[in-house]
Amino acid sequence: MRFLAAFAALAFASAAQAAVPADWTTPQAPFRIVGNTYYVGTKDLAVYLITSPKGDVLIDGALVQTVPQIEKNIAALGFKLSDIKLILNTHAHYDHAAGIAQIKKDTGARFDASAADKPILETGSISFGPTKDVHYPPVKVDHVVKDGETVSAGDVHLTAHLTPGHTPGCTSWTWNETEGGKTYRVIDICSVSVAGNPLMNNKAYPGIVEDYRTSIAKLKAMHADVFLAPHAQFYDPQAKEAARKAGGPNPFIAPAALQTFMAKAEAAFDAELARQEAAAKH
């Protein structure tokens, strides 16, 4: 995928200076996905807003330089930054976490994240992989979430599913949305791509392969009616939004999408692991 090559080329002093793929910063008009869940990110860096009359939730913060786009998108939908009471994170790589510190400051929202990603988020630095030399503004974690824990803001309730591998504290999130009188289960998975991570002899994360395999199996066993991900290229929400505008049923409601994606993700992981194992023998 395009962002894998971009990750592999990164070796910069700060997230603000890092060269990034154009679609990470290309503006994207916001749109509704299902129920009260909205896409407010850039063309490829997904950021999700889930609203309720008593408080809103934001998942991920994209880049430092894209914060103004995200905040503009939220306003364009008619919502206020001050209504965001909770910020969540799928994982602590800079392209999904670098903007959180500023958004937290602008909203005054609580920030929840996993224990294993907390040290990365609070230092703005990860010790392994292609982004280990990219540093971003650290952000204080107000509450550490556990696997299976439900966190809430207003009438929005989300459940954390720890799916480590991509980062040690990678967290997938599920919640329910209602549309047309029916309730749908939504999932925003944490990435399970290798994306340049060292799988062999990773002293900073020796259990990385086992964690990937466990997380892949966990996600394969889950059910979701609506599949979302941290990168738009994983599921092409723009095409789905265009199809909805053309008429017909909501294309985001696709119960087979999660399993279709996970089958491809598992095959990609197996292939990359085999490649790294072969390389380690030479």
Image (cartoon, helix red, strand yellow):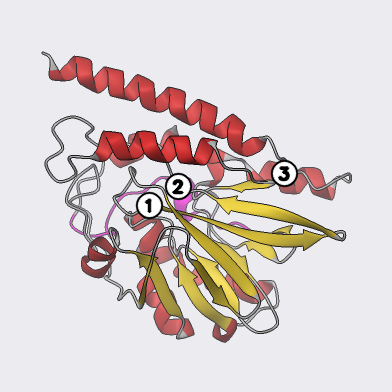
- The crowd level at tag 1 (other Cα within 10 Å; few <14, some 14-19, many 20+) is many
Q: Position of residue 202 (x, y in %)?
A: 15, 37
Q: Earlier in the sequence, mark 1 or mark 3?
A: 1
Residue 33 versus residue 86 in the image, above or below: above
Residue 181 versus residue 187 in the image, above or below: below
Q: Residue at x 23, y 22 (%)?
A: 276
Q: Which contiguous range is marked in magenta?
A: 13-31
Which label number is shown at residue 22? 2
Q: Amino acid at mark 1?
A: Cys
Q: Position of residue 230 (x, y in %)?
A: 49, 50
The secondary element bearing badge 2 is classed as helix
Q: Earlier in the sequence, mark 3 or mark 2?
A: 2
Q: Would residue 115 be found to the left or right of residue 42 on screen?
A: left
Residue 199 appears in the rendering = yes
The secondary element bearing badge 1 is classed as loop
- The crowd level at tag 3 (other Cα within 10 Å; few <14, some 14-19, many 20+) is some
Q: CA distance from mark 3 to mark 2?
A: 21 Å
Q: Amino acid at mark 2?
A: Ala
Q: Residue at x 28, y 34 (%)?
A: 209
The secondary element bearing badge 3 is classed as helix
- The crowd level at tag 2 (other Cα within 10 Å; few <14, some 14-19, many 20+) is few
Q: Amino acid at mark 3?
A: Lys
